[in-house]
Image (spheres, rainbow, N blue to C red):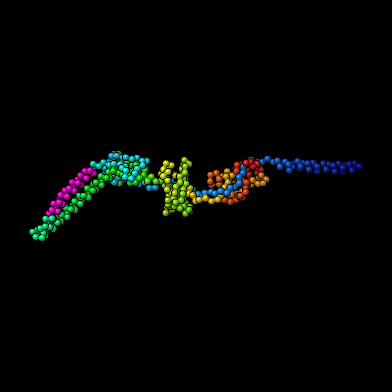
């Protein structure tokens, strides 16, 4: 009887142990209702890729320079500057007097040349009279052939001396003109070394002139990109202030630098750029090649993980997964996605940088 009671107690104890284990296991696993109310990791916004026309551009850096810069020098030497009429930045016209040299010495040379010319003319007049008399007497044989040749030769020599004196006078008058330094073309004075009172040597530079006040942008492009550029192509140049200037490609350099394998592209700048750009400025520009269709996303949606460009996509279960994508051109705050993204994907925009794959999110407008 005691053995039978003992066996009954063992069965009850085993039953209670099994029930306890089941209750503990159920307590450790959340039911479906509990799982359904799991809290999202973050509230995010989403966007779908947009097909838009995107301009095709090539960016480059370069230097603003004068289209042509003329050197204005002294065409006469050893004279003192008495007047300088222009300064750096002044607009000048072709033929305008920029500086004046003292002309006392040159005026004296002119007077001397005039006197020599008058003397030569007097000698020539006498020689011509003798030659005319000899020509009249030659048929009668009154004068010898030797005397006739002498008179005719003297006439020719006197005429040559008159021409030489006239040339000397013309040279002296030309020197007088060169005492006034004139602008060779319309433009703006970019540099000045002339100073009143200085004695200037022949050929010394006095001014530098930007011809026609024309500027150009000289863009550096790698040799592999030069073939895309054509004369007449439009270029959008951005100034430091944010203003934009539209230029036009004039020509490409015929050679490429052997050191860095880059070539120059010469871009004509409009007259309206004069107040915005100055020679020597380093600016950035974009060559335009028309437009093409592109799949765009906000740049904010792009995250960089392990060196790859990636985006988070929200699935039907409101959990995110990470997709690797390839990117292309940028326009404003949008970026082109070239591959790796479905057209109907819901891409996380705000909050993308704080997520990990598999996170539960709440999407708001």
**Residue 16 magenta:** no
Which x, y percent locates residue 14? Answer: 83, 43
Which x, y percent locates residue 148? Answer: 12, 58
As drawn, which residue projects farthest toward the left? 142
Query: Would you identify the image quadrant in which residue 83 lies?
Result: top left
The quarter in which the C terminus is drawn is: top right
Dominant secondary structure, magenta:
helix
250 left or right of 76?
Answer: right
Q: Nearer the viewer, residue 338 or 194?
A: 338
Mark count: 0
As drawn, which residue projects farthest toward the right? 1
Q: Which span is picked out in magenta? A: 106-131
Q: Nearer the viewer, residue 221 or 1?
A: 221
147 left or right of 305?
Answer: left
Residue at 53% of width from left, 46% of height from top? 331
Q: Nearer the viewer, residue 30 or 315?
A: 315
Residue at 60% of width from left, 42% of height from top? 350
Q: Is residue 83 visible?
A: yes
Which x, y percent locates residue 136? Answer: 11, 57
Residue at 52% of width from left, 50% of height from top? 291
Query: Would you identify the image quadrant in which residue 1 lies?
Result: top right
Residue at 13% of width from left, 51% of height from top? 126
Q: Is residue 218 visible?
A: no
**Residue 113 magenta:** yes
Which x, y percent locates residue 324? Answer: 60, 49
């Amino acid at each position: 009887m005691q053995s039978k009671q003992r066996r009954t107690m063992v069965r009850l104890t085993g039953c209670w142990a099994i029930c306890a284990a089941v209750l503990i296991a159920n307590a450790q696993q959340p039911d479906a209702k509990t799982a359904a109310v799991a809290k999202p990791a973050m509230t995010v916004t989403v966007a779908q890729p947009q097909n838009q026309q995107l301009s095709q551009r090539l960016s480059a850096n370069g230097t603003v320079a004068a289209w042509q810069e003329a050197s204005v020098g002294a065409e006469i030497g050893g004279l003192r500057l008495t007047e300088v009429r222009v300064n750096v930045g002044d607009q000048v016209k072709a033929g305008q007097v920029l500086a004046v040299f003292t002309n006392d010495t040159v005026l004296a040379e002119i007077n001397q040349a005039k006197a020599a010319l008058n003397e030569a003319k007097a000698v020539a007049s006498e020689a011509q009279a003798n030659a005319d008399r000899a020509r009249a007497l030659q048929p009668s044989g009154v004068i010898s052939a030797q005397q006739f040749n002498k008179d005719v030769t003297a006439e020719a020599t006197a005429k040559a001396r008159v021409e030489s004196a006239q040339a000397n006078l013309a040279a002296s008058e030309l020197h007088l003109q060169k005492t006034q330094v004139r602008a060779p073309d319309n433009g703006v004075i970019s540099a000045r070394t002339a100073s009143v009172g200085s004695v200037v040597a022949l050929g010394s530079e006095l001014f530098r002139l930007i011809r026609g006040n024309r500027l150009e942008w000289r863009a550096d492009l790698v040799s592999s990109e030069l073939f895309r550029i054509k004369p007449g192509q439009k270029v959008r140049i951005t100034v430091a202030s944010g203003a934009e200037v539209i230029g036009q490609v004039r020509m490409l350099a015929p050679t490429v630098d052997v050191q860095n394998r880059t070539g120059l592209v010469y871009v004509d700048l409009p007259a309206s750029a004069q107040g915005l750009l100055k020679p020597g400025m380093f600016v950035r520009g974009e060559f335009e090649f028309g437009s093409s269709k592109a799949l765009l996303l906000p740049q904010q949606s792009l995250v960089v993980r392990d060196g790859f460009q990636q985006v988070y996509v929200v699935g039907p279960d409101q959990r995110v997964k990470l997709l690797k994508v390839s990117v292309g051109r940028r326009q404003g705050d949008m970026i082109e996605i070239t591959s790796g993204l479905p057209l109907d994907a819901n891409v996380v925009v705000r909050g993308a940088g704080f997520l990990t794959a598999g996170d539960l999110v709440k999407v708001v407008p």
